[in-house]
Image (cartoon, helix red, strand yellow):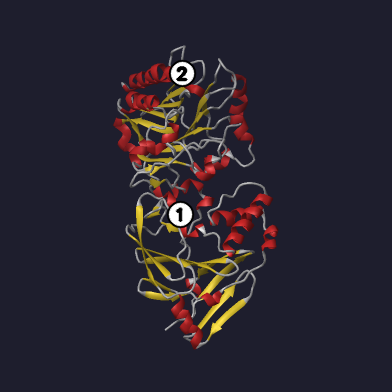
């Protein structure tokens, strides 16, 4: 029996898609199918036994032993191509991204791109990239076999059955991504002859008893897409770009970092702990002037006890005025500025807790003129905020970095460790492993990812007993803390992990959470945090 299915149709000028609303399913007479167009408020209805019979023969989708059908008689003829010009830039970009087309340029360029694409579809010259998009379970990746070849729409006589071979999805929010980004899960494809007269591609992905089905159809005047999904199951990644899995050499088992789902529950109120936060602000005065940024909101949201800053770019004459603007309750602040190059580098520690002692620099004149290190002593540990020198253009400071700075900092930390555990945080200017950078092969000789810097990081810090807390907590997670402005890396999540919390091995098991806050903007780095049980 074919039951009545009510489909919500979101009408956006020329591009449309269907979404089944399970909450509004109504069961009336067995041969009635209604299609309501929400955007244009037009209604098409099919209501006859013969129509129902044709509907049953046209397209059959098997999902959890149930049968749902879509008929070619439900073709929708929308507005003409000229109405594209009435769309906003945001709508144009949204439509282009949905179709897998780059959405950059002026409004006129976007309009031209959309018209060109749709004209090619109407003329039968192109194929939609929607067949490369799936719904995944906050996972970076699901891929098709033969993903290196371009997807081809099946002919009117072919039916595609796709089954998920590795469906370990949970009930978390799901994110749309392109299949070609996926190295882990594979989907087998089988084709067989079916006496249908319309081009169509069907994707059926089943996870833990919940089925998500997408059908794409090509009609004479436009492309429409039907999507069957459970309510509230999709989270569009464009709103959370850090959940995009961006890596050019992914390994099996890697997943993308999502603080919404990967952070542990907060500690109980009666559990003694400290929350430490670190941030390369890339110019503190410029950050504080941003209308979109509020230090008060960040402090209220995170409720940190200590805030460590790098690359403040302050001069000594600026420090007093900045101190006067500190948030209430953070009465202890310690600043060091570059004296060899004004308005350069600079680090600081701002704390609710008054430290037992404070030190500036490494105690070595060759290293201490750029304001790169502040150390405070608390009851249970030393806390260092550091801004490690960048090897620079042409790697001109590489030798200084690996042969002088790193060994000196490492020795300094080991000396402190003789009396108390040590925590080093800040921009350490090294993506240690391939998982820590989106394009490892293309950056082999880039400052921050040279073999020499990575080996120095291993030798001087990790091999000497300091633990990378984020990597210990998330061994197979791709999470970045830096995205270059030059290539607009934040929007595509093409980043580097350069910011760390390293702790002495003796207190590594006291770390409750080591995390990244990728949603906090205002700098090309994001803040990183550490929750330490006392």
Label 2 residue SS: loop
Query: Which image quarter holds the N terminus?
Result: bottom left
User: 143 and 81: which one is in front?
Assistant: 81
How many discs appear?
2
* Lower sequence index among marks 2 and 1: 1
515 lies above or below 281: below
In the rendered image, residue 435, in percent from the top left (x then y), is placed at: 38, 39
Between marks 2 and 1, how big is the CA–CA gap? 56 Å
Query: Which image quarter holds the C terminus?
Result: top left
332 lies above or below 241: above
Quadrant of residue 91 within the rendered picture: bottom right
Marks 2, 1: nearer the viewer: 1
**Left or right for 462, reference 393:** left
**Left or right for 100, reference 167:** right
In the rendered image, residue 336, in percent from the top left (x then y), is placed at: 52, 21
The residue indicated by pointer 1 is 150
Q: Residues within 10 Å of mark 2 (few under 14, many from 20)?
A: many
**Left or right for 140, reference 524:** left
62 lies above or below 51: above
The residue indicated by pointer 2 is 361
Quadrant of residue 174 within the rendered picture: bottom left
Label 1 residue SS: loop
Would residue 364 be visible to someone looking at this image?
A: yes
Residue placed at 53% from the left, 42% from the top? 490
Residue placed at 36% from the left, 46% from the top? 254
CB under 8 Å between discs 2 and 1: no
In the rendered image, residue 52, in percent from the top left (x then y), is placed at: 48, 83
């Amino acid at each position: 029996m074919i039951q009545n299915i009510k489909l919500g149709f979101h009408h956006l000028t020329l591009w449309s898609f269907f979404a089944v609303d399970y909450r509004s399913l109504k069961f009336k007479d067995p041969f009635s199918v209604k299609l309501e167009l929400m955007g244009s408020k037009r209604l098409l209805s099919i209501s006859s036994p013969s129509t129902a019979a044709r509907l049953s023969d046209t397209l059959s989708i098997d999902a959890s032993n149930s049968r749902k059908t879509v008929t070619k008689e439900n073709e929708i003829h929308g507005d003409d191509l000229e109405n594209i010009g009435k769309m906003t830039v945001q709508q144009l970009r949204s439509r282009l991204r949905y179709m897998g087309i780059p959405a950059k340029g002026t409004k006129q360029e976007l309009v031209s791109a959309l018209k060109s694409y749709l004209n090619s579809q109407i003329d039968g010259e192109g194929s939609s990239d929607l067949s490369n998009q799936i719904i995944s379970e906050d996972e970076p990746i699901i891929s098709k076999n033969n993903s290196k070849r371009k997807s081809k729409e099946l002919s009117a006589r072919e039916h595609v059955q796709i089954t998920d071979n590795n469906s370990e999805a949970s009930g978390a929010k799901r994110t749309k991504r392109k299949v070609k980004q996926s190295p882990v899960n594979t989907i087998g494809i089988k084709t067989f002859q079916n006496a249908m007269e319309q081009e169509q591609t069907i994707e059926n992905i089943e996870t833990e008893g919940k089925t998500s089905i997408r059908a794409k159809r090509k009609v004479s005047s436009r492309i429409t897409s039907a999507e069957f999904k459970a309510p509230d199951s999709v989270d569009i990644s464009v709103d959370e770009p850090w959940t995009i899995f961006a890596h050019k050499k992914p390994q099996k088992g890697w997943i993308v970092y999502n603080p919404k789902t990967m952070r542990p529950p907060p500690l109980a109120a009666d559990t003694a702990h400290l929350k430490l936060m670190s941030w390369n602000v890339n110019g503190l005065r410029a950050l504080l002037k941003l209308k979109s940024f509020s230090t008060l909101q960040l402090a209220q949201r995170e409720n940190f006890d200590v805030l460590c800053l790098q690359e403040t770019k302050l001069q000594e004459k600026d420090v007093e005025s900045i101190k006067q603007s500190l948030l209430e309750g953070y009465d202890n602040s310690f600043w060091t500025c570059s004296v060899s190059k004004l308005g350069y580098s600079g680090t600081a520690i701002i704390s609710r807790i008054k430290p037992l002692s404070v030190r500036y620099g490494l105690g070595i004149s060759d290293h201490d003129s750029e304001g790169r290190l502040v150390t405070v002593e608390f009851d249970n540990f030393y806390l260092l905020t550091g801004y490690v020198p960048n090897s620079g253009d042409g790697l001109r400071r590489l030798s200084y970095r690996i042969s002088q700075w790193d060994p000196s900092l490492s020795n300094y930390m080991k000396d402190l460790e003789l009396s108390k555990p040590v925590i080093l945080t800040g921009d350490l200017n090294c993506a240690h492993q391939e998982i820590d950078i989106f394009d490892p092969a293309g950056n082999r000789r880039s400052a921050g990812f040279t073999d020499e810097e990575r080996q120095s990081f291993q030798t001087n810090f990790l091999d000497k007993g300091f633990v990378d807390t984020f990597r210990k907590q998330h061994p197979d997670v791709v999470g970045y803390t830096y995205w270059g402005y030059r290539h607009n890396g934040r929007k595509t999540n093409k980043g580097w992990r350069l910011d760390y919390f390293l702790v002495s091995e003796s207190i590594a098991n006291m770390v409750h959470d080591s995390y990244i806050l990728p949603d906090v903007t205002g700098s090309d780095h994001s803040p990183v945090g550490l929750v330490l049980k006392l």
